[in-house]
Image (spheres, rainbow, N blue to C red):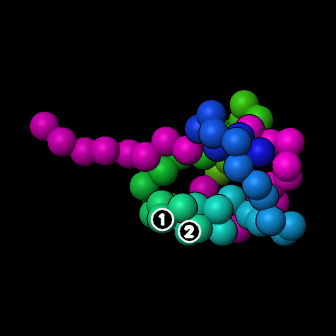
Amino acid sequence: MKINGEVCTCSPGMTVLSLLEQRGHDPQRVAVERNGQIVPRARFAQEELHEDDTIEIVQFVGGG
């Protein structure tokens, strides 16, 4: 699997939510794209990942 351009391994049964938690991301503050498609936040816990997936995680940053 590729995550933000970096090759990583994927555990069997890993979901978008478990990936985010493993990498220290707050699921409420990120957008996730899987294979070119936005994953709705409501599906993070159900969306199962596979070794051939390409994932992009974008962190929301506030400021002025």
Where's residue 35, x and y in %? 76, 35
Q: Characterize the magenta stretch by its predominant secondary structure.
A: loop
Q: Secondary structure beneath disc 2?
A: helix
Q: Residue at x 70, y 49 (%)?
A: 8
Residue tagged 1: 24
Q: Which residues are magenta?
A: 41-64
Q: Nearer the viewer, residue 32 or 5?
A: 5
Q: Nearer the viewer, residue 26 or 24?
A: 24
Residue 32 - label:
none
Residue 21 - label:
2
Left or right: residue 26 compared with residue 4: left
Left or right: residue 64 compared with residue 51: left
Magenta stretch: includes residue 48? yes
Place residue 62 in its image quadrant.
top left
Instruction: Categorize mark 2 by other alpha carbons within 10 Å: few (<14), some (14-19), many (20+).
Output: few
Picture layout, residue 22 above or below residue 39: below
Q: Residue at x 48, y 60 (%)?
A: 25
